[in-house]
Each structure stands twice: as C-alpha cells, then as structure tokens.
Amino acid sequence: MKSYILPDGQNSFNLFSTVHLVTLLVVLSVAVLMFFFRKKLRTKPYYFIVRFSLFIMLLLSEISLHVWLYWIDAWEYKHSLPFHLSSITLLLSALLLLTKRFSLFEFTYFAGIGSALQAMVTPDLNAYTFPHYRFVHFFISHGGTVLANLFMVFVEEFRPTVRSIWKAFLWLNTYALVLFFVNLIIGGNYMYLLRKPANPSILDYIGPWPAYILPLEIITILTFIILYLPFWIIGFMKRH
C-alpha cells in the first residue's frame, strides 16, 4: 500500500496505454450519464447529492495533494501553491458549485475545461501510473473540473455566450500577467510563464521561451472557440 504514495512511482506512465484510455473512458462515461440523466439530477435528493459530491471531491483532491507533497517533503512555495491554471480553475469550479455564479462559469467553463482536457489527454505524470496516488489524484482533479462545469451546463442549464469567450480570455491573460510578476518575486514558474517545464510537453513543439507564449495565446483562443461551438450549433439549428 505504501508504494502507492511514494514520492517516486515504480511504474512509468505510458501515453495512450490501456490504463490511460480506460481512465479517459470513465470520465467520458460519467459525463454522458450526467447528460442523459440531467432531468433526474434536477430533482431532490439527486441534485444536492451530485452537486455537493462534486464540490467535496474537488476540495478534497486539492487538499490531499498538499498533504501528500508535505508528507514526501516536496512542498515548496515556489512550485506547490495552487497558482497553476489547473489548481485555480479547480478551486473556482468548486466555488461555482456553491455559488452558481454565472460570471464564474464564464471563466471556468473555458479555462477549466480547456486546460483539464489538454492535461488529461497529454498528462505530465512520468513515473506515476495507476494505482499510484498521483495518477488517481490527477484524473480526479482534472476530470472533476470538467464534470463540475458540465453539471452547470446539463443540470443548471448555464450557457456561455460569444462575449463569455472574450471575457474568459481577458481574465486568463490578466491572471497570467499578475502571475508573471509573482513568479519573478518568488522564483517560481507557475503556468510556465518564465520557462518550459523540465519534463517533455507540448511546449517543446512550439518553440523556446518566450517565443511559445504567442502560439499558446492562439491555441487558447481556438480552444475557447471550439468549446463554444456546440452552443452555437444548437442555437443555429433552433433559429433555422
């Protein structure tokens, strides 16, 4: 049991391996079930059970990560604070489940789902695979962020607008600008704004720092547009 929480995993993660694909399928299956049972989930007690279960899952996943990092003596303010996009959107998605504020949804739907999907398809896990804690936490936290926002779409019937795309993009860049100076002050590299991650990533195919910043901006806005497309298509079909 202890081997599942060791700082260094004993089995390397393989991209698109059976365990990776099955995990993605599990997340997809839960999302599909949430869609098909959306009307049932609007009724008591299912509504409160699912809504607050998602909230607790997100909160505990983030807390458990910091406990684990502290336990393995790896917690450090330069890289362990919840400043990465995945952590900040997770916490905001948890807050969204509590408050049901549309302004939060406008950001977490695009930034949260966009970053979480990219992370789950190309995870930065290296030596951690199932059933190691880091693997389980990774997919619960990222999958939970996706499911929390889909809950707001399917059950609460929240709908982003074209304006929401640009609001999310503006807020994301504002956050990145503030975080850039935070990184300079504390010597961190949150959101990889000062250099590429040490491990292989998609940034290796874009270019060196700071050249990869502009392509990332383009990828981000394209991702947001793709995430909006289902709503545009549905609206177009209703109008015609």
Image (cartoon, rainbow, N blue to C red):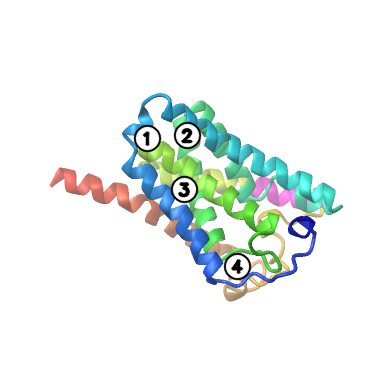
Residue that carries the numbered disc 1 in the rendered image: 155
Label whose residue precedes the other's in the sequence (3 or 2):
2
| Quarter of the image that includes the N terminus | bottom right
The residue shown at (40%, 24%) is: 44
Image spot of residue 137 (x, y percent):
64, 51
The region drawn magenta spans 176-186
The residue shown at (51%, 26%) is: 99
Closer-to-camera residue (21/102): 21
Regarding residue 185, the answer to whether it shows in the image is no
What number is the disc on residue 86?
none
Q: Amino acid at mark 4?
A: Tyr
Q: Amino acid at mark 3?
A: Phe
State which mark lies toward you, 3 or 2.
2
Crowd around label 3: few <14 · some 14–19 · many ≥20 (10 Å):
many
Label whose residue precedes the other's in the sequence (2 or 4):
2
Closer-to-camera residue (2/8): 2
Q: CA distance from mark 4 to mark 3?
A: 21 Å
Label whose residue precedes the other's in the sequence (4 or 1):
1
Is 37 placed above or below 112 here?
Answer: above
Q: Circles 2 and 1: CB distance less than 8 Å?
A: yes
Q: Circles 3 and 2: CB distance less than 8 Å?
A: no
